[in-house]
Image (cartoon, rainbow, N blue to C red):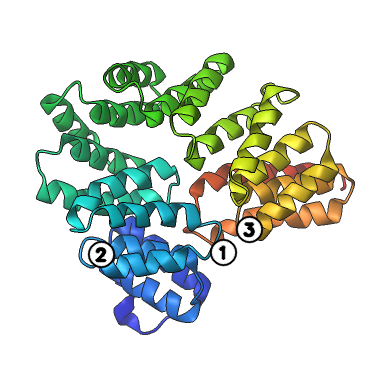
Amino acid sequence: GYAKNGPVEDVPLLRLIIAADFALRDWSDAHAMLNRLISIVPNDAAAYYQRAILSTPRDRQSALTDLGKAMGDPAVQPRAQAASRILSDHPDGASALFPLSLQLIADGQAVQWPLAEYLLNRVVAVSPDNVGALALLGLAQDQQGHDGWPLLAQASARAADDPTVNYAIALHWRLNGDLDAALSALARAESHDPNNPALAAEIGSIYRLRARSADAATWLTLAMRLAPNNPTFWQLLAAFYADDEYTLNGDGLIMIQQAVRNFPNDAELRATLGEALLKTAQPGAAQAELETALRTDPLNMRARYYLAATLEQQGQLSAARSGYQAVLDSATANPTADSAGSNFQLMAERALQRLAGSGG
């Protein structure tokens, strides 16, 4: 680990080390580096949140204290609040590990997978009969580039009809590009658990990948209606409408506006509204929403990219170039941020090439 090699005071380097520790599953060093980061940046809500998850198996009270501090940042507050609620509902601590794992996975951010694996390893060690945890452990390994199939196959052999097992298998096949096998597994899961919003959302996401937009809208809307107080499912639906430009001049934009009214402090939803307004030729309104999103979450990739695109559309090419470059630079500055932002980095790179080619 890095902790024994002397103190590290450089904040970007600390973030890189923490990301590497997560990838290497070096949890003790990750905990030490998070302690050091918090000592230097005492208002780093993401660091408090990550330290809380690592503390949960052995020190529930410390985890609750850290989650309370993480709630001070609107960008981290929803997931910190959800985790705190789970811990409060499970006073013994150990029984909180599986539902907390599910919350990490439902969050949909790549940085959560190592933390989910960390908790699921402990769930499986204590409760070897929990086939859902075994399957999700395999999935967590899959999502980080390791081979999780042996655990998934073992879980399937023990409980072929279990909805959680089939959900994990579906995500395995989706990750490997076999959308037919993914849909088949999801159909099995959904038949045994028809009111599960995560299943509906995954079915909708696969229809989206297959360019079956009407079916995607149906299933993503169902997911949102099954869990109307969970912003994650609103985010998935809003991103579908905005990114795919589906009925943006009608129901799509109305739904995104409703989502922002429901969750006014959600930077991702507000950024998606900014994107939708830009794509419906409302650049002034788009800029206002995107700047508001960045005040809430300065690292939000969607907001950064579409603010640069808005500036470009308004002819402010120098500012647009700087904005696109900031999107590209963000991977180095904050490696523990959601790696789904890599798509926006690719788009920013193309935008910079386009501006350079046009002499802008």
Q: Residue at x 32, y 54 (%)?
A: 115
Q: Viewer-nearest of labels 1 and 3?
A: 3
> Distance between the Cα atoms at labels 3 and 2?
29 Å
- Where does label 3 land, which residue? 296
Residue type, label 3:
Thr
- The answer to whether the residue labelled 3 contacts the one labelled 2, judged by CB atoms less than 8 Å apart, is no
Which image quadrant for residue 184?
top left
Between 241 and 347, the one lying in front of the other is: 241
Picture disc at residue 12: none
- Return the residue found at the far bottom: 6
Q: Residue at x 32, y 31 (%)?
A: 172
Q: Residue at x 36, y 43 (%)?
A: 105
- Where does label 2 land, which residue? 60
Is 72 displayed left or right of 107 in the figure? right
- Where does label 1 land, which residue? 333
Q: Going from the N terminus, do you reach mark 2 or mark 1 first?
A: 2
Residue type, label 2:
Arg
User: Does the rendering let one see residue 307?
Assistant: no
Q: Position of residue 1 (x, y in %)?
A: 29, 71
Q: Residue at x 35, y 53 (%)?
A: 85
Q: Position of residue 124 (x, y in %)?
A: 15, 46
Q: Position of residue 189 (x, y in %)?
A: 29, 22
